[in-house]
Each structure stands twice: as C-alpha cells, then as structure tokens.
Amino acid sequence: MKFSSILNHFCGGQPQSNGQRPNSEPGTHTPVAAEMSAKKVTSQFGTIGRSYNLPLWSKEEKQNYEHDFAVMLAHGDLESIRLELLAQDNSVLFEFKIQFPGQRVAKKLFDYSSGVELPVIDRQAVAKHRIVLQQHGKIDNYHHLLKVNWGPAETLHKRPGDAFPSEHARKITGGRQEAGFHVSSEVRERLTVTQTGNGAFAFAEAAARGWRGIFLHRRFAPQGFQFRIGQQVTALLVQTPRGIQARAIRNN
C-alpha cells in the first residue's frame, strides 16, 4: 500500500496543525546513515530554494524535517521526496524528486555539473513551493516520533515538460539516492552548436540570451545523437558550478 503526504508549507505559510506535535521518545536514536541521508536531502533542497529566492524553512524547521526524514528512512517507509516549485495558478513548473534505492553503487559515477543542477527558470514565474512524500504505509509504527504535522497531498496539475536525471545526487550519495528533474517545456531554449569535441560533447550559444560556451553532452540527448557545428537544437538549461549546461537535448 502506498500513499502520499504533503507538508502544507507554501511560501510564507505554516504547516497545518492537527492539535498535536509529538516529539521523539527519550532514548530513541535513528541510525547515522539515515541521518546523513536526510541531511543530503535538505542540503539539495536548500540549494534549490536559495537559487529561486524561496525560504524553505527556518533553522529549527530544517532540523525538524531532517529528523522526520531520518525516522522514515530508518523505518523503511520513505520511497521518495519531491520539491515542487509552483506558479500562481498552483500548477507545477519544476519538480526535483529524490528516491531511495538504498544500495551503494560499485561502478564509477559521473557528475558533469559538480553541484546541484539548477534549471534556468524566470524567478518571477515561481510563486510558491511544497514538499511531497511518497511512503509505503508504515507510518502507524512511528507517527508518535515525528515533529512535523503531515497531511494528505492535493493532486496538482504538472505542466507538460521534460525530465532528466541528477548525476550530482547519485554522486554525493554513492548511488544510495537517485534524483531527477521535471521542468516545464515552456522554458526550453534554442541553441546553436558552435564547437564540437571528441563526438561526445560540444559547446553552443543561446543567441536570444547572449550566452556562449554552453556545455552539451550526448549523455543528455537521445541515443545515437551527434553534434555538428551550426546545428540547431533545443534544450533545458541548468546553472552549475561549471557554468551553463544543457539537458534534455533534441533537434530543433
């Protein structure tokens, strides 16, 4: 049995109260691995929130969320957590979803961004946010340990768009977390390839924005995709510590 829960925490709002705010039992400890995993979730969410000028939580609230995420992970009851950025009409512009397969990956993991991939979206289009959990139905076993008041999740319209994986989330957790983005297709950009590398990567410009040196890699394009100078493509752009990069690349 699966069900969703939502932290009813829109910008400037507070979680709805059910009249109770349970605390952890004295002497109750969560595994260090669960606590570390929870901290990586709030760290990634916090980076996204700051980028879009969204105050996700106060210091105390952040600690409460980390506590609850760790408790849920320790009880094997957390399938995924997603951060949604919403427009004024409450439609979902952007989704960052973290899943918990739990097993460390032995193979080498790549991270071309070297940081959280931040989709280029007009900040003025983002009105609020929410955090939604997908669970396995075990909450009765630990509900009394939670510090945040959780409630049912309303189903919101997700704008049509494109999805791409977060290499950074896998890299920093050794594969114990897998994450992906879904971004509205209305923010796709037209690019012109200006330089090619060894066949696997290229650089492009977005003439409409006056941006050059945008990094493209065929890992983020359909299988068999080839870059050539002068080629017109469209893509979602992400800001990274290594500069602007392209995701969900396809021919124009």
Image (spheres, helix red, strand yellow):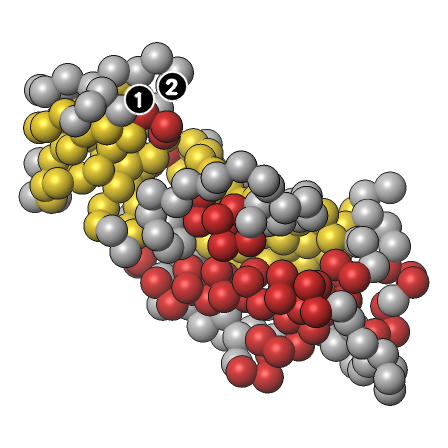
Q: Which residue is mark 2?
A: 222
Judge whether residue 120 can be spotted in this image. yes
Question: Crowding near pointer 1: few (<14 within 10 Å), some, many (20+)?
Answer: some
Residue furthest right in the image: 141
> Which quadrant: the N terminus?
top right
Residue 85 on image: x %, y %: 47, 54
Q: Residue at x 22, y 20 (%)?
A: 199
Spatial CA span between label 2 and label 1: 7 Å
58 versus 112 height, above or below = below
Numbered badge on residue 250: 1
| In the image: residue 24, left or right of residue 156 | right
Identify which residue, 196 or 49, lies in the foreground: 196
Q: Residue at x 50, y 66 (%)?
A: 43
Identify which residue, 80 or 127, lies in the foreground: 80
Image marks 2 and 1: residues in contact by CB distance under 8 Å: yes
Residue 117 on image: x %, y %: 37, 49
Judge whether residue 20 can be spotted in this image. no
Identify which residue, 7 or 44, lies in the foreground: 44
Q: Quadrant of residue 38?
A: bottom right
Residue furthest bottom in the image: 26
Q: Residue at x 55, y 62 (%)?
A: 40
Residue 150 on image: x %, y %: 74, 65
Q: Residue at x 39, y 45 (%)?
A: 111
